Amino acid sequence: MKTDDIDFDHLLRSNLERVFNERDDDKRRAAIAELFVEEPIMYEPTNIVRGREDISRVAGDLLKQFGPTFRFVPDGAAVGHHGLGHLAWHAGPEHGPVAVTGTDVAEIESGKISRLWVLLNAP
């Protein structure tokens, strides 16, 4: 796959919406199977998460922890080239104040996310 063929915006927005905003475990697992390579790695500030199942568990636990209206919202379009893309975002209660901001940085292999770094901005 040529780097020009990667739709970074679609891929990273889909990850935000269909994985990290998805409360249904089965839908989230299906999205991860579509968006991530077979053995992905996610780097969080305090943890390294390996595999599709663990990424799904972490996303689900995060949503449970912050309540039913917590959402991640993209800020602008994702951009990238040569297999590396990034998307800025903010998150918090749907109609409440922003609780956290950050950026997802993803390494893309064969059109899927192979490694994902979750970078949080200072409060």
Image: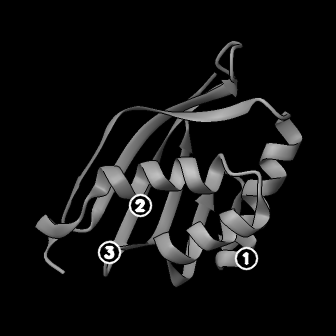
What residue type is disc 3 on? Gly
Q: How far apart are the two marked residues, 2 and 3, measured between alpha carbons?
A: 11 Å
Pointer 2 residue: 106
What residue type is disc 1 on? Glu
Q: Secondary structure at mark 1?
A: helix
How many neighbours does mark 3 have within 10 angstroms: few (below 14), some (14-19), or many (20 or more)? many
Residue occupying the point 39% across, 43% down: 87
Where residue 101 sits, quadrant-wise, is top right
Quadrant of the drawing holding the C terminus:
top right
Where residue 83 sits, quadrant-wise, is bottom left
Pointer 1 residue: 53
Q: Which mark is residue 111?
A: 3
Determine if residue 121 is in view: yes
Mark 1 vs mark 3: which is more N-terminal? 1
What residue type is disc 2 on? Ala
Query: Is 61 located above or below residue 77 in the figure?
Result: below
Residue occupying the point 84% across, 53% down: 61
- Residue 88: percent from the left, percent from the top? 43, 36
Query: Is 33 located above or below residue 27 in the figure?
Result: below
Front-most of residues 70 and 118: 70
- Residue 98: percent from the left, percent from the top? 64, 18
Furthest toward the bottom, the residue is: 38
Q: Secondary structure at mark 2?
A: strand
